[in-house]
Image (cartoon, rainbow, N blue to C red):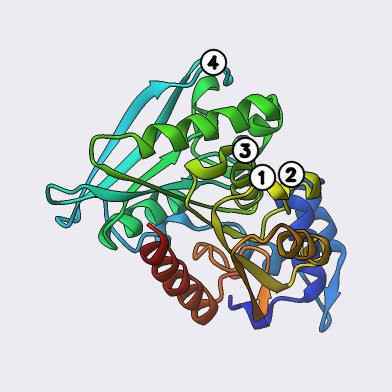
Amino acid sequence: MRQHEIDDQVFELYDEYCHGHIDRREFFKRAGELTVAGASALAMAQALIPNYAEAQEIQFTDRRIKANWIEYPSPGGTSGEMRGYLVSPVGKGPFPAVLVMHENRGLNPYIQDVARRFAVAGFLALAPDGLSPIGGYPGNDDDGRAMQRTLDQSKLRQDMANSARFVKSHEASNGRLGATGFCWGGGTTNYLATELGDELHAGAPFYGSAAATDKVPQIRAALQVHYAENDKRVNAMRPEFEAALKSAGVTYEMHTYPGTRHGFHNYSTPRYHEQAAQLAWERMVSFFRQHL
């Protein structure tokens, strides 16, 4: 089922479900109670559940890359240790480093694939699994979302900061660091920009919560911020965020993609918008090449 075939009311319910305000049972129940063109909207709701079998642009066996699961210290984080998916281009390097942060459900196959895409583009990419201290991504988003809600957010963010510093200092890194993330990972990209200062050289958050206004003057990285047109919750934060960036003299650019919804880059669900996702990817890769 394609995006234009799904009613706006179902997308709104899905947004509540994705952000943990209702569970899957309630999502399907409410969708089943909706009538669209004389029929139940349940099929529309079912079509929005991610299909990760189709969310693979670069296979882990691709000969252009080297992919490994690694463990590394994370002092002050959830457990003191982290596990992540490290992907590098084939070759000697060094390569510019990019941290790739997941949504609010752990390191699922979609984010792993994004890391592989970065490696194909010439970057050393680390995708940390914030759930690794409590068992790791469980294989489905519902359980992953529930697990991530149990974590101390300050410790989880510290795990991301430690992951950023780890990949930046990796022997295959050229010492230049970029960060990107989606939804929760987008907000954490903005957060890391305030916390890492000149350790971070570029950030590209996708539809994530804005950085705290009083912390924006601490940002030293260049930012490329990506918004979906139909994303009221995140977009409501934009004016204050942009005003703070301007006031602090931060190098930034912002892009809004017409006809898109929150999650438009995730090619495992009908929220995916192919043209916008490809344009955003090309912009981000070019931006990172410029600054890293």
Looking at the image, which is closer to me, 103 or 169? 169
Q: Residue at x 37, y 57 (%)?
A: 292
Between the C-alphas of marks 1 and 2, the distance is 6 Å
The disc, 2 or 3, on the residue closer to the chain's N-terminal end is 3
Between the C-alphas of marks 4 and 1, the distance is 28 Å
Between the C-alphas of marks 3 and 4, the distance is 20 Å
The disc, 3 or 4, on the residue closer to the chain's N-terminal end is 4
How crowded is the residue under tag 1: few (<14 C-alpha within 10 Å), some, or many (20+)? Answer: some
On screen, residue 8 above or below 221:
below
Q: Is residue 137 left or right of residue 190?
A: left
The disc labelled 2 sits on which kind of residue?
Lys
Which residue lies under the disc numbered 3? 195
- Nearer the camera: disc 4 or disc 1: 1
Looking at the image, which is closer to me, 96 or 247? 247
Between the C-alphas of marks 3 and 1, the distance is 7 Å
The disc labelled 1 sits on which kind of residue?
Gln
Q: Secondary structure at mark 1?
A: helix
- Nearer the camera: disc 2 or disc 4: 2
Which residue lies under the disc numbered 2? 215
**Is label 1 in contact with label 2 (beta carbons under 8 Å)?**
yes
Q: Secondary structure at mark 4?
A: loop
